[in-house]
Amino acid sequence: MIPRRARPNSALLTDTYTSPHRAGHDRQSADTAILRSRAGRPVHLEKQRAFVHELTRRLDLSPTFSGGVTDLQLLQNIVDSKALSPDQTWELQSLGIVLGDIFAKQFGLRWVIVEDEYGRDPALRFSSTSNLVFPLTMISKRVEDVRTVDLHAIYEGVSDCIAEFNESS
């Protein structure tokens, strides 16, 4: 297991998970369910993806996301433009969904919904294990905390964890 303190605000753990909205609740309870989503991408996230695509057009950035690593720079340009303020949580989390799409494509992860007594959160699941990645708040928490957002470093951190998932499976 990767201790939460070892990867602050990455919202990434193995075997157990911490939802970004459930700090202090590290253990996966018996009441936690990992739900499959239709076609591998929860439909309600499409609205957030559409927002990010519209934002790229508004900022005169390339409006095409391929799910490739090159999309990291596009997301970084959006963050660096400061077009979104720290109080725009939904909008910042929309960037996290597009970041998650990159992880899904690059690492073969699947979108799922994690449901427990605290609610539902989108997550990416590694294979059919309980290893989960929660990209929703990987950007928003850093912006809200007025910390540097380095999407290439976040990507590398997730890549390292996926390598650990592969070794342990």
Image (cartoon, rainbow, N blue to C red):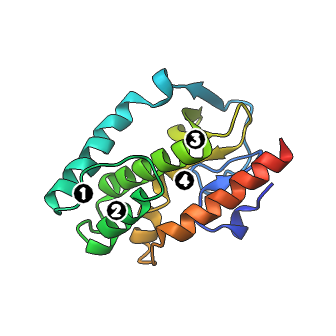
- Report, in whole angstroms, how far the alpha carbon at label 2 lies from the one at label 4: 24 Å
First in sequence: mark 1 vs mark 3: 1
Which image quadrant for residue 157? bottom right
Label at residue 20: 4
The image position of residue 148, as x and y in percent, is: 45, 78
**Residue that protrudes farthest toward the top in the picture:** 38
Q: Is residue 4 above or below residue 117?
A: below
**Residue that protrudes farthest toward the right in the picture:** 168
First in sequence: mark 2 vs mark 1: 1
Q: Label 4, secondary structure: give it.
A: loop
Position of residue 2 in the picture relative to residue 103 (left or right) = right
For the residues bearing labels 2 and 1, Cβ distance under 8 angstroms = yes
**From the viewer's perspective, is the residue at label 4 or at label 3 nearer?**
3
Which image quadrant for residue 61? bottom left
Along the line of sight, the residue nearer the viewer: 153 or 11: 153
Query: Can the viewer see residue 38?
Result: yes
First in sequence: mark 4 vs mark 3: 4
**From the viewer's perspective, is the residue at label 2 or at label 3 nearer?**
2
**Residue matched to label 1:** 62
Which image quadrant for residue 147? bottom left
Label at residue 74: 2
Along the line of sight, the residue nearer the viewer: 42 or 57: 57
